Every structure is written in structure tokens, then in C-alpha cells.
Image (spheres, grey):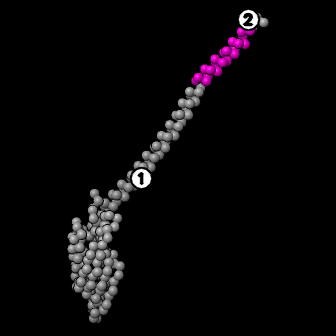
């Protein structure tokens, strides 16, 4: 074999090794970059999904807070309108007297006392009322007691006939006031 014949396979081998090395030098970094970009894209998609979820949650909380604010500040919400517990007790007494007089009745005894605070925003006023009512107005009085703001949650009542036209009514229940009106 000649020198040129011996060097041709070595040269071809060297050429293929050089081409393989260049392919490896180009393809391996490209593959690594491609997989890294894929990982980054997945992470960013997960972050975007988390952001969208938190935005939706924030919007739901904001809407609920706005609805509560509108409800709590509405005069039809049914809470006693008073800044303090003492004011709430007086407002409750005034409401009961007004309702009894509107239906032709008279309050005999009114016992009002502070109850427990619920959800750190709503204070309860416990009440026990004894009234003399016209028999014909008894149903309307009880209905107005529960349906006219500030609402009274009646837990028990007892009506005893005093004479042909009047009954003695004993009502136990509660009213509520907001401790702090939302913004």
C-alpha cells in the first residue's frame, strides 16, 4: 500500500470523528437548552395558574365582603342601629314599645340583657317581654315583631287569655346589633 492509501482510511476516520464531535458539540447543548426551556415553560404555566386561582379567590372574597357591607349598612338588614350595647338595649326597648302601641297593646315588663357575641361582629340582646294585647292584634304583633326591622328572633311565646278581648303575652327571643359596621 502506498502512503496515500494508508492515510485515506485514517483521514476518513478522522473526518467522521470530527463531524461527530461537531454534531455532539452542537446537538447536546441544543438538547439541554430545549429541555431547560421546557421546564421553565412548565414552571411559568404553573405560576400563572396559581396567580389566576389567587386572583379568582381574591375577587370572590372581595365580592362577598362588598355584599356583606351593603347588607350590613342597609336599614333592612334587621340589626339594631346603635353604637354601644347600652344604646342597643334602649333601641330594642323603644322598638318593642312602638310595636306594642301600634297594635293597641301595653308592655307590662321588658327584660333585656346582653347575650353572646357571634363571629366577633354581631352582639345578641336577649329579651323577655310581657305584654297585654288585644286578642285580634296578637297575630299581627307577632308577625311584625319578626318581620319589621330590627328583627326579633322569637324562641318561645305563651298567650294566656285575660278576658274576652285581651291576652297576656310572654315572648322570649333575641335581637342583634353589629359591633363594627364594615367599610
Q: Magenta stretch? A: 6-26
> In this orientation, does residue 140 appear?
no
Position of residue 138 relative to residue 25, above or below, is below
**Residue 84 appears in which quarter of the rendering?**
bottom left
Q: Check disc 1: other Cα within 10 Å, few if <14, some if 14-19, many if 20+.
A: few
Q: Which mark is residue 78?
A: none
Q: Nearer the viewer, residue 58 or 17?
A: 17
Q: In the image, what residue occupies the spot 41% across and 49% down?
A: 55
| Residue 134 in the image, given as x and y percentages of width and height | 27, 88
Q: Taking 110 as reference, is 156 left or right?
A: right
Q: Is residue 9 magenta?
A: yes
| Residue 160 in the image, given as x and y percentages of width and height | 31, 90
Residue at the disc numbered 1: 57
Q: Check disc 2: other Cα within 10 Å, few if <14, some if 14-19, many if 20+.
A: few
| Residue 154 in the image, given as x and y percentages of width and height | 34, 78
Q: In the image, what residue occupies the spot 32% across and 78% down?
A: 173
Position of residue 73 relative to residue 128, above or below, is above
Q: Secondary structure at mark 1?
A: helix
Q: Which mark is residue 3?
A: 2
Q: Secondary structure at mark 2?
A: helix
Amino acid at each position: 500500500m502506498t502512503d496515500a492509501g494508508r492515510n485515506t482510511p485514517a483521514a476518513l476516520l478522522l473526518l467522521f470523528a470530527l463531524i461527530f464531535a461537531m454534531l455532539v458539540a452542537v446537538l447536546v447543548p441544543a438538547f439541554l437548552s430545549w429541555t431547560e426551556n421546557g421546564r421553565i415553560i412548565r414552571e411559568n404555566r404553573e405560576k400563572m395558574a396559581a396567580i389566576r386561582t389567587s386572583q379568582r379567590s381574591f375577587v370572590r372574597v372581595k365580592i362577598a365582603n362588598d355584599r356583606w357591607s351593603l347588607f350590613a349598612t342597609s336599614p333592612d338588614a334587621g340589626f339594631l342601629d346603635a353604637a354601644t350595647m347600652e344604646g342597643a338595649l334602649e333601641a330594642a326597648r323603644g322598638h318593642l314599645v312602638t310595636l306594642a302601641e301600634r297594635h293597641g297593646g301595653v308592655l307590662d315588663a321588658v327584660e333585656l340583657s346582653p347575650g353572646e357575641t357571634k363571629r366577633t361582629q354581631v352582639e345578641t340582646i336577649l329579651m323577655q317581654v310581657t305584654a297585654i294585647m288585644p286578642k285580634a292584634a296578637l297575630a299581627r304583633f307577632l308577625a311584625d315583631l319578626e318581620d319589621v326591622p330590627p328583627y326579633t328572633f322569637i324562641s318561645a311565646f305563651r298567650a294566656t287569655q285575660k278576658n274576652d278581648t285581651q291576652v297576656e303575652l310572654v315572648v322570649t327571643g333575641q335581637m342583634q346589633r353589629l359591633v363594627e359596621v364594615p367599610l
